[in-house]
Every structure is written in structure tokens, then in C-alpha cells.
Amino acid sequence: MKELQHLNKYFVKYRTHLLIGILITILARIFLVYTPRYVKKIFIAIEKYADGGVSDSVFKSELTEAILYIIGAAIIGGILTFFMRQTIINVSRFIEFDLKNEVYEHYQKLSLNFYKKNRTGDLMNRITEDVGRVRMYVGPALMYSINTITLFVIVIIYMLNASPKLTLYTILPLPILSVIIYKLSREIHKRSTIVQEYLSKLSTFTQESFSGISVIKAYGIEPQTSVNFKSLAEESKGKQIDLAKVQAWFFPMMILLIGTSNLMVIYIGGMQYINGEINSIGTIAEFIIYVNMLTWPVATVGWVTSIVQQAEASQKRINEFLKIEPEIKNMVHDETEITGDISFKNVSFTYDDTNIQALKDISFNIKEGETLAILGKTGAGKSTILDLIGRLYDIDEGSIKINGTEIKEHNLNTLRNSIGYVPQDAFLFSDSIKNNIKFGKQDATEEDVIEAAKNAQVHKNVVKFNKGYDTVLGERGITLSGGQKQRVSIARAIIKSPKILLFDDCLSAVDTETEEKILKTLGKISKGKTAIIVSHRVSSAKNADKIIVLDNGKIVQEGSHDSLINIDGYYKHLYLKQLSQPAGH
């Protein structure tokens, strides 16, 4: 139960609802246990009438009164049970909502390193399957536990008042039941953890298969993928069956022990009646009803225990992530305006997941309103510089300053809101084109959206679609071509009108003519703004105020376009190579 202590704050939050639910539960049980007492009274009335002790009218009156009490108690108990479910089960839904939000918000705070080390399917499984199992603990399990405890206390008190000796024999099987539950619960906990791990593996496999379906089809490996999925599903099924085998012991054991209690009531009670220790056969009938009243609560003990064990296993998996501290923390809560002066001084950075040193002793300066172009071979560290400016990672050594202030001393939200970032791999959401562009500025008008699309040279493509800007894209923007995705991504960045624009090789999928138009427009838009363009094309870099060339994480060339084409090196070689290529390549 240690892992489930995380939920105590939610129980405190919804304590009023829970206390009302507990009170209603107690009242509902009190009304329901009236039934056996009035059944006993009916038997006593029949015995008196059979012996000639009461008249017909008195017998009918007593019988009618008892029946009306039974019906009334059942109706009131039923109504209270309904409200009991409405209060406690609703609380479980509230807690499920809060817990999902807590997990999601924590996911948002975690750094990119976390997402590199963990699979999407596993993350999804923890916020869906695991939270769902926890909800069963705070809802049905809690409700039936309160119900069972309340019923046990009330019923045992009534039974002791009726016949202490018969009560003792009736509850004799319960300690045996407790030992069995304890042993089975430990095994269920162990197997539940394994089942959840396999559910995560299945979620991850299917998520990756659906996301990469175009690659799977292109390589024609659907049969092999199906075989792999079937193999994983078979393993998961085996673990589920192992768990089910243990859980299957609960109900037969409950029925056996309850049946044993019934036999004891009939035998011991019958002997006591014969020996005159109890004065009415109605006491035996009362006890049989009590025992059968306890049948479902006792049966639910196993079910509830199973739910608690599964919930603890799931909450443990959730807690593992909630305990992870974000590597990138917002150190400052005061907001200061970002103007765009950027300074790198002796910056070095190594990726934790691969241990690859991406940058080595990098230094450069960009003044507000200037444009910097970064070129270099694949893996030279170009994209890493953009990630560090957005503080997606923290550097190992050196200093990054924005407006002359250390980057860590800026409010993280203000910093990122001041940046318009177009990643190399343009990611679009399964939403309309309009909303994908407005993602950069939620309160943007339709005119703002169209203007941004025109500046990104994608407006003419969008208006040709049947639904125009209301066209809903497939997953990751699969509806659009690579060039169209990049241009929508550019529109999303520039609609913010940010102080800093970061373009990570975002024109690689467009032709040179479109590239020239976009660059011309961006030149106008970025007036007074700081822009950094990462590219493999000289055409994207030639108009920049400053150009740096990276190789193996180090700056090997630095200067303007005019100065660099006159120096032997990577830039001149690339310029001559691309100059000789036909237009459109």
C-alpha cells in the first residue's frame, strides 16, 4: 500500500464527497440488515399462531407489519445504495481526471532526454491503462471495502445479540479465508506487475507500427510485422492467463467457505433448537439470511484485494515517472523582455543518451536584428546549437547569454515564447491546417493565418484543397507533401512574430524557386529580429550577416558570404558544387 499513499492528497481534496458517501453507506447497510430481524419476527408469529397463542387478526397484523417493514427497508436501502454509488464512484472519476492531468503535466516538464530514453507506447500505457487500474482502487474497491466493513460490523453485532455461540461457529471459516487471501494477493501483485509491463510492450509495438506504416508497406514486411506482433501478443496472453489462474481461486474458495458457514448454521442452529438453547426456528432463518448477506461482501474481499494489488503495481509504475526530476528547470519566475542578442562562449555539449560530444568549445555572437547562417556536414552539431538556444538542453561547459544575461537566468516560458522554431522534421498535428498554423499564436485571426501562409508560400496550395484552411490533416501531417509540411511549419513560427527565429534546415524539401521566394519574404519579416538559419544550401545562407561552418562540433570557418567564397574550404567547395547544379536541384 506504500505506493498508493501518493493518492492521499486526492482523498483529502474530495474528503467531503467521501465522508457523505461513507455516511450513506452506513445508513444503507443499517436499513438492509433490518430484513433478517423481521423475517425472524414472521417465523415467531407463525409459531405463535400455529400453537394457538394469537388470533387471526393479530397474526395478520403482525405479518403485514413485518412485510411492510421489509419492503420499506429494502426501498430505502436501495435508494441510499444508489446515492452511495453516485458519491464514491464520482470521486473515483474526479481523481482519475486529476491524476491523468498530473501525469500529463509532469510529462510536459520533462526534458528531451527523457523522451529519448522512454518509448511513446509505454508513456501512453501509464496514463491510460495504469491510471484506469488506479481508478478502480479509488472507486469500486473503496466503495466495496467500506460496504463490506460496515456490513460486517453491523451484522456481527446483530448475530451476537441473537446467539453468541452460533455466531462463533458461523464466522469460524473467516480466519482461513484471510490467510488464503493474503497468500493469493502477494502472487496477484507479482503477476499484475508483469502483465502491465507486457501491456506497455504491446502499446509501444502497435504505436510504432501505426506511425511507421508507410515504411512497413514500402519494404513489404507486413507479414513479418504481423508475426512479431502475434509473438508478443502470445507472450502477453500467457502472462494474462497466469494472472487469471490465480484470480480464479478466489470465488470458488469464497463459495466453499460461505457454504460451510451455511451448513454450520443449519446443523449447530438445529441442534441448539432441539436442545432448547434457542427459542425459535426463526433465529436459524435469520442467521442464514445474515450469512448470505455476507456472501457477496466476503466474495468481494478477494476481488477488492486483486484490484488493490493491481492498482499498487500500476501506481508504482506511475510514481516511477512522477519521481523523475526535470533536467531543465525554470530558475526565474520574473519575466524580462528578450531582445535577441545571443552570445556563445566556449560552449561544449555532450548528449547523455549516446555520449556523443556534439559541440566543442563553440564561441560566436549575434546582435539583435542580425541573421546567422550555420552550415556543415550531417552530425556536425548545427541543430544542437538551436536546441541550446531554446534551452531544450543545458550545456556542459561554457556560457550562453541572451541580452547579456545567462540563459538559465531568464524565465523559461518567456524565453521560449520569444522564439519561433521550425524543426528539421516538420511535425504537424492531426487537426485543421488553420489550427496547425494558429498553434504558434492561439488568438490569431483568420487574416493572420492567411498572411502567415502567404509569407510561407503555402497559401496557394491550401486554397486548392476542398476545405481550404479547414482541411484536417492525417497523423503527423501525412496529408501534405514534405515541402508543404515544412511551409506550414514556417507559417506556424512566423505568425508569432517572435524576437528570435530559428530555422533548422526547413527548406530542404522545397525547390530552389520556392526557396528563393520564402527567403525573400523571411528577409522582410525578420527585419529587426534575430534569425538563425541552419542549412545545407549556400542559397539559404548567402544573404546572412554572418556565416559559420561546423565540422565535428567545432567552428572551422566564420565570416560573410563574400569573404568565405574567396577562401579554400568547405563553404567555397559547397558553393561551387551547388553553383554547377541545374536549377531546381
Image: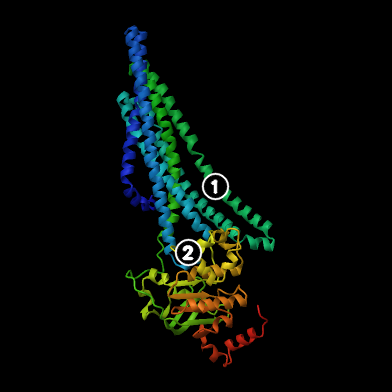
Quadrant of the rendering where the C terminus is positioned: bottom right
Q: Is residue 339 left or right of residue 380?
A: left
CA separation, marks 1 and 2? 42 Å
x, y percent for residue 214: 64, 62
At numbered mark 2, what does the secondary structure look like: helix, strand or loop? loop
Q: Position of residue 535 (x, y in %)?
A: 56, 78
Q: Of marks 1 and 2, which one's residue comes earlier in the chain? A: 1
Q: Nearer the viewer, residue 542 or 88?
A: 542
Colour scheme shown: rainbow
- In the picture of the structure, the residue carrying the numbered disc 1 is 240
The mark found on residue 439 in the picture is 2
**Circle 1 Cα neighbour tier, 10 Å, few/some/many (<14 / 14–19 / ≥20):** some
Residue at x 57% of width, y 74% of height = 507
Quarter residue 67 falls in = top left
- Report x, y in % for residue 41: 34, 18
373 on left or right of 411 = right
Query: Residue 517 or 88: which is nearer the viewer?
Result: 517
Most foreground residue, 451 or 119 = 451
In this view, 15 is above or below 232: above
Q: Residue at x 40, y 65 (%)?
A: 325
Q: Is residue 66 above or below residue 205?
A: above
Amino acid tagged 2: Phe
Can you give x and y, in whole percent of width and height, for residue 431 in the image? 53, 59
Residue lying farthest to the front in this orientation: 447
Left or right: residue 94 compared with residue 557: left
